[in-house]
Amino acid sequence: MDYRIVVDAGHGGDDPGAVSGGLREKDFTLEAANYMYNRFKELGVPVAITRDSDVTLSRQQRLNTMNNSFGTDPKVIILSNHINSGGGEGAEIIYPLRSSSTLPRQILEEIGSEGQPTRTYYQRRLPEDPSKDYYYIMRETPDTTSLLIEYGFIDNANDVERLQNNLLDYVEAVVRAVTRYIGVPYVAPDGISEETYVVKKGDSLYSIAQKFGTTVDQLKKWNNLTSNILQIGQVLIVSEKEETAPPTENYINYTVKSGDTLYKIANEFNTSVQQIIDLNDLGTTVLSIGQTLRIPTSGSSTTNTYTVKSGDSLWKIANQFGVSVDDLINANKLTSTVLQVGQQLIIPNQGSSTPPAEETITYTVKSGDSLWSIANRYNTTVAELRRFNNLTSSSDVLQIGQVLKIPNSSTSNPITYTVKSGDSLWSIANRYNTTVAELRRLNNLTSDVLQIGQQLIIP
């Protein structure tokens, strides 16, 4: 079973939440929740929201959305957005008695990496019954991973200034932490996919390089470092930015109207946000009324059907066939993301008549390996590795010699690549999801030195 997200905008309508100097908590939380909801949709994560406008929700209405959207189990993550009061400063997170501190810790670290002071992550008990959680959002959402995220204090001048200027940066930090926790590939709002890591006590460039399957020199290059000295809380890029595919020449022109978003336009024209970004060379997802966008068009409207199997989710099927979750929802007129084994789904705009066979190969864990580095090497995801090997998020620690089953996706015929200035065997291997050793083998190389213009066979 894959993770699902419920986004909550705290308070609303007749309940303003914390108030100070004309500012109202409910306004901050609504902005945060709507942004968070749209980002998870863009990333293909099943998501629901308690309110997307300034309406009054009863306690039961809020709980109904939280408990009924995806059911109640630990892989339903409830993110309740709030602004604190009481004269303190900085962000903090409250998590349930039933849950571990791993996710709240990671979220708080990511918020801190955006420049917001952080306080702590903690659990709070009900005074009259210490076996229960203090907040009903945790107490009455059984088994879920429900978190209260307090981004800062509405009655602290420093926090208010940062919240007014940087709130969405802090929300993006939450999205970033959650996607990494659940094993979904993170793509930043500007369309650039990169992995980052927050330096912890005891880290060194060498240990971080080993953790992510790279080298100290690459880490220094990606992060413009001139020394090996690190600071706790420092954010490092730990993998190379992906190169976007060249845009298609088949497109129509579209003029942006009031209320448009990239997500809304992509959904309307049966394409993806990333394709629109690539085709228009956009550096931001913010649109202007009257702006002209090129919208990619597809020359094929073929569809296939797929029979749902045990363990399937919309996200997994969308990822398997290279479409979006919304494509599947629209093509099948779904009103829920819950699937039934044996259910027939229409797969839109898919050239292949059959889905890839769910075959596996085996891999023996070596020193320095992590689920992330192995998933990257074999063009799969951490979530898939966990599923194939019955691993939980708390068992990501691997043992040298451990044998893992790897999803065996079909490989295409080798292609050739012409070496450009700045290329290395490592960067080329990373770009094409292969290994330096495989490039050496296919090309009979005895040295890692490359020449500009040299032709390489890519598996």
Image: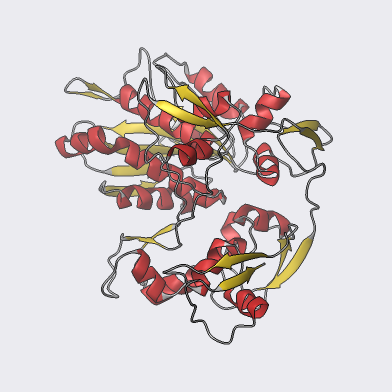
Q: Quadrant of residue 23?
A: top left
Q: Residue at x 75, y 57 (%)?
A: 410
Q: Residue at x 48, y 77 (%)?
A: 451
Asked whether 207 or 158 is in front, the reply is 207
Q: As displayed, is residue 419 above or below residue 233? A: below
Q: Quadrant of residue 36?
A: top left
Q: Would you say 452 lies left or right of 359 here?
A: left
- Image location of residue 16, percent across then percent down: 31, 18
Q: Would you say 387 lies left or right of 276 here?
A: right
Quarter holding the C terminus is bottom right
Count of numbered labels shown in the rendering? 0
- Using the rendered image of the protein, determine whether residue 293 is visible from the camera's viewpoint: yes
Quarter holding the N terminus is top right
Q: Residue at x 66, y 43 (%)?
A: 322
Asked whether 386 or 423 is in front, the reply is 423
The colour mode here is secondary structure
Asked whether 459 or 398 is in front, the reply is 459
Q: Residue furthest right?
A: 342
Q: As displayed, is residue 374 above or below residue 302? A: below
Q: Residue furthest bottom?
A: 446
- Image location of residue 330, percent across then percent down: 66, 25
Q: Quadrant of residue 4?
A: top right
- Image location of residue 2, percent across then percent down: 64, 44
- Using the rendered image of the protein, determine whether residue 337 is visible from the camera's viewpoint: no
